[in-house]
Amino acid sequence: MFDMTAGHFVFIPAVLLFGMVIGWILGSRAAADAYAAELRRREERAARRTGGAKAATAPSAADAA
């Protein structure tokens, strides 16, 4: 009934280790994507802030011509 072979002591930790490796890889990719998205958001916000301030204070070359 409880006849576990030595294969259980190898197979189960191997599957757990494999799952941890896959989780580590997928998690690091998701974290890198989230970091890149946050940087893009910050750059867009900064561009909107500085772009709006430039347009209000200094005319562009197209407006001067």
Image (cartoon, rainbow, N blue to C red):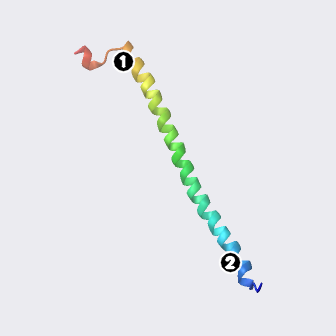
Give the amino acid at mark 2. Phe
Q: Residue at x 50, y 43 (%)?
A: 36
Mark nearer the viewer, 1 or 2: 2
Report crowding for label 2: few under 14, some 14 to 19, many 20 or more residues within 10 A (C-alpha).
few
Instruction: Identify whether 34 is placed above or below 14.
Output: above
Instruction: Identify whether 53 is placed above or below 21.
Output: above
* Quarter residue 18 falls in: bottom right
**Rendered location of residue 23, percent (x, y):** 60, 60
Q: Residue at x 22, y 15 (%)?
A: 65
Residue holding disc 1: 55
What is the tally of numbered marks visible in this picture? 2
* Quarter residue 16 falls in: bottom right
Q: Nearer the viewer, residue 1 or 22?
A: 1
Asked if the residue under mark 2 is in contact with the one under mark 1, i.e. CB atoms within 8 Å, the reply is no
Q: Nearer the viewer, residue 47 or 62?
A: 47
Q: Nearer the viewer, residue 53 or 9?
A: 9
For mark 2, give the secondary structure. Answer: helix
Left or right placement of residue 35 versus residue 58 in this view: right
* Figure quadrant of the N terminus: bottom right
**Rendered location of residue 63, percent (x, y):** 26, 16
Residue reaching furthest left? 65
Identify the disc placed on residue 11: 2
Residue reaching furthest front? 1
For mark 1, give the secondary structure. Answer: helix
Give the amino acid at mark 1. Ala
**Rendered location of residue 3, percent (x, y):** 76, 86
Identify the disc placed on residue 4: none
Q: Residue at x 42, y 18 (%)?
A: 53
